[in-house]
Image: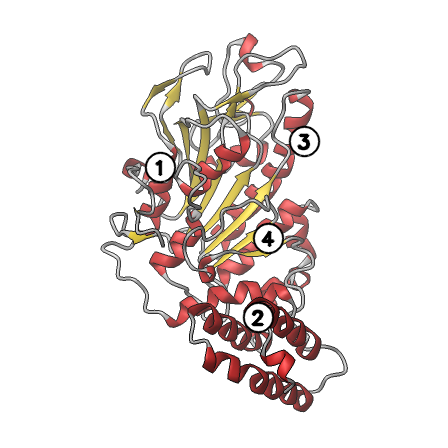
Amino acid sequence: MKPELLNTDGCNRRAFAGYLAKSLLGVGLAPLTFQQNLAAASKPVTEVSRRGAATKVIYLYMNGGMSHLDTLDPKTNEEVRGPVSSLIAPHCGIQVSEYLPRMAGLMHHTAVIRSMKSNQGAHERGRYFVWTGYNQRGTIRHPAMGAWAVRLGGVMNPNLPGYIKVGGDSRHPGSGFMEAKYAPLPIGNPDRGLQNSGRPKGVDEDSFQNRLSMVDKFNRRFEESYQLKNVRAYSDAYEHAIKLMKSQDLAAFDLSLESEKTRAAYGEEAFGKGCLLARRLIERDVRFVDVSLGGWDTHQNNFERVPQRAEILDQAMSALIQDLASRGLLEETLVVLATEFGRTPKINQNNGRDHYPKAFSCMLAGGGVKGGTVHGATNAQGTDVESNPVSIPDFNATIAHALGLPQDEIIYAPSGRPFTVADKGKPITSIFA
């Protein structure tokens, strides 16, 4: 090996190694990134004091602040409700907006939480608070709920990452201060699945193994010289990437394997396809899947834009719940519908609604949840929580409770500061059967 390569600094050396692996092996950066998650599979699963009905989570995030008044908490006051009527769920009597007709028939599977409150009224801080249960700070990055679920619950399928994120904001906190192996694998386009995960065309198995051997020789001296956690993780990532390339579980990312009828049920929108991908992934024992739907920031034309967003949500979420139920997966899968805050009861001069963290709604389904349940309430104008207030940490503690995660287990940040999965949140145990 040339001396100039041996003497390069660590950053350039790693960049060159990554380029070499991509060129020789056909292993792109996406599998390298997500396979860091898989190192968790070799770790013993943390013992938990109680295992809930749920073992997996599909987390549907409504990016932008979903209007509770036009979805899950409709009002009769004409000045508040605007030109929106409500529907009564046939099996349980829960009222929802006319924009959610399919979900109206499935509310007996859900628990609606109408008394959510947040102290964050700006998008970025509000999203961060919901995802992590902690207020955003400049000195630390907190882990998202999916990272906590994998850290405390372990990886269920050693061939797949424990946490996957479909679509959504690039500023997602990911694994925060935890190791990179707990970060979500990002999937940008659910139709394209996992990119750069197959052997390159024209390279047979013998040639591929020769290339692996070459890379191993190339890296060995560097690894022996630098016995560091990050160096070992980099090497392990390639090993796990190759393992996945040969695994039948790779098929989980291929939506074309679904029937036309099933694909049609979820719809043609990226969010619906993301929900279908989420079902395929939890079916293969991925523990936590995020799927995002944006466009809920309706300062203008609320009553034109919300119906469009709600139609996409209604089709995809109803198909997901029915699909999970028909496959016997709903009881073990907690489906979460969350957003950073609600919208103002007052309709502004642009026929829109503004940010409103004082009162909003979220929803849970499956995972041991008592269906046909409404927790908490806002007043007749939708301006204030009237009963059973639920904070963001409380909501995250409820997810942790459903998964049976140890809520008092302390994880220390590199700075030495202690953290728990839901800060000081208290789970809403009354909504579980």
Task: Report, in whole angstroms, how far the alpha carbon at label 1 lies from the one at label 4.
Answer: 28 Å
Q: Is residue 174 above or below residue 354?
A: below
Asked if marks 4 and 3 touch (Cβ < 8 Å), the reply is: no
Q: Is residue 188 above or below residue 303?
A: below
Which image quadrant for residue 428?
top left
User: Which mark is first along the chain, 1 or 3?
Assistant: 3
User: Which mark is first along the chain, 3 or 2?
Assistant: 2
Residue at image point 46% right, 63% down: 285
**Which residue in the protein does label 2 denote?**
9
**Which residue in the protein does label 1 denote?**
393
Task: Report, in whole angstroms, how far the alpha carbon at label 2 lies from the one at label 4.
Answer: 44 Å
Question: Residue 276 shows which numbered tag?
Answer: 4
- Residue that sits furthest to the right in the current view: 202
Task: Report, in whole angstroms, how far the alpha carbon at label 2 lies from the one at label 3.
Answer: 52 Å
**Which residue in the protein does label 3 denote?**
308
Tell me the SS state at disc 3.
helix
Which image quadrant for residue 353?
top right
Q: Is residue 111 above or below residue 96?
A: below
Task: Report, in whole angstroms, how far the alpha carbon at label 4 lies from the one at label 3.
Answer: 20 Å
Q: Within 10 Å of the Cα at label 2, are there few (<14), some (14-19), or many (20+) other Cα atoms?
A: few
User: Which mark is first along the chain, 2 or 1?
Assistant: 2
Q: Within 10 Å of the Cα at label 3, are there few (<14), some (14-19), or many (20+) other Cα atoms?
A: some
Tell me the SS state at disc 4.
helix
389 or 413: nearer the eye? 413
State the scheme by which the image is colored. secondary structure
Residue at image point 41% right, 66% down: 40
User: Which mark is first along the chain, 4 or 2?
Assistant: 2
**Numbered disc in front, either 2 or 4:** 2
137 relative position to 310: left or right: left
